[in-house]
Image (cartoon, helix red, strand yellow):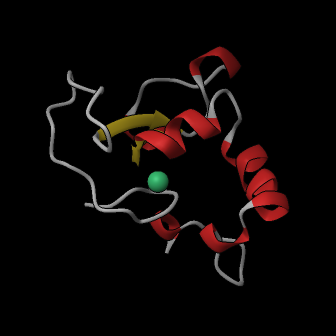
Amino acid sequence: MGCFYCSASLDSTPWGRQNASNGQTVDHLIPPKRGGLTVSSNLVYACRSCNSEKGEMTLAEYRSWCAAHRTWKLDRWGRFPGER
Ligand SMILES: [Zn+2]
């Protein structure tokens, strides 16, 4: 199980423990504050750095942000590792 956004391997820490250095966190593709629901189709595993970097951006907004700042996370079709 790797990070949805950067494919980094994740510690298999329990969902409740999200404070490990590169621990597994659960990210909302559409953040709750943006109207996203806590349902499996809106949840992905992400490393802590990607999760905090994405913040309150939606998946589409983070894709655009990465295209502008961190192109290495996206493949040539603009997809994140978790979308392949
Ligand atoms: Zn990541």
Location of residue 8 by image quarter: bottom left
Viewer-side residue, 3 vs 84: 3
Residue extending furthest toward the bottom: 76
Viewer-side residue, 42 vs 8: 8
Residue 41 place in picture, x, y as percent: 44, 43
Residue 15 place in picture, x, y as percent: 21, 29
Asked if 17 appears above or below 21 in the picture, the reply is: above
Residue 71 place in picture, x, y as percent: 73, 70
Name the side, left or right, on which 9 lies relative to 33: left
Residue 63 place in picture, x, y as percent: 73, 56
Residue extending furthest toward the top: 33
Quadrant position of the N terminus in the picture: bottom left
Q: Residue at x 32, y 61 (%)?
A: 2
Viewer-side residue, 30 vs 74: 74
Residue extending furthest toward the right: 68
Name the side, left or right, on which 1 lies relative to 84: left
Q: Residue at x 64, y 79 (%)?
A: 75
Name the side, left or right, on which 84 lies relative to 13: right
Asked if 22 appears above or below 77 in the picture, the reply is: above
Count of numbered marks: 0
Residue extending furthest toward the front: 21
